[in-house]
Image (cartoon, rainbow, N blue to C red):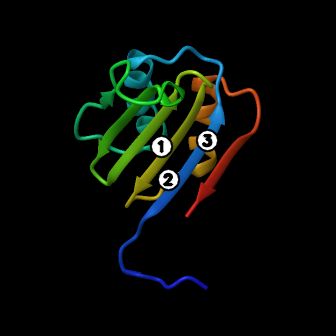
Amino acid sequence: MPKTIAPDIFRQRLLIEGYFERHVDEAALRAYLPGLAAHLGLRPYGEPVIFAPATGMGSAANAGFDAFMPLIDSGIAAYVWSGPKFLSVVIYSCAPFDEKAAVAHTREFFNIPGDIVEHGF
């Protein structure tokens, strides 16, 4: 059994991964991150920060976006691979949230037709 560190501090984490069909650009991520926060009742305190490395800065296979939405109770990070249309979203919160609602919202927003891997911890 893993060691429990800081049992007096509540934290909930959820990883969501899947292959999507929607066209994803910076505008889509600027809509998704605050939309997900609102859907889960989590409170942002700033605008999403989105990075898209310039062509040639890294491997073409890893081209896409890195994004972060600061929350009063922690944050949401999203990583998008444009070529294979794959995403990995991590929600880290010190306030409880509905994991099934997070997965459903992500599936609908990105049009994920197949399997989604989700892991709460």
> Residues under labels 1 and 2: Cα distance?
6 Å
What residue is shown at x 48% (from left), y 43% (from top)? 40
Q: Quadrant of the C terminus?
A: bottom right
Disc 3 secondary structure class: strand
Q: Mark 3 points at which residue?
A: 17
Please name whichever residue, 31 or 62, is drawn nearer the observer in this view of the structure: 62
> Residues under labels 1 and 3: Cα distance?
18 Å
Is tag 1's residue or tag 3's residue first in the polypeptide sequence? 3
* Vertical order, 8 against 58 (above or below): below
What residue is shown at x 62% (from left), y 56% (from top)? 119
Q: Residue furthest right?
A: 114
* Disc 1 packing (10 Å; few <14; some 14–19; many ≥20): some
> Which of the two discs, 2 and 3, sits closer to the camera?
3
Q: Mark 2 points at which residue?
A: 97
Please name whichever residue, 18 or 70, is drawn nearer the observer in this view of the structure: 18
What residue is shown at x 39% (from left), y 34% (from top)? 66
Whole-percent x, y for residue 90 in the image: 48, 47
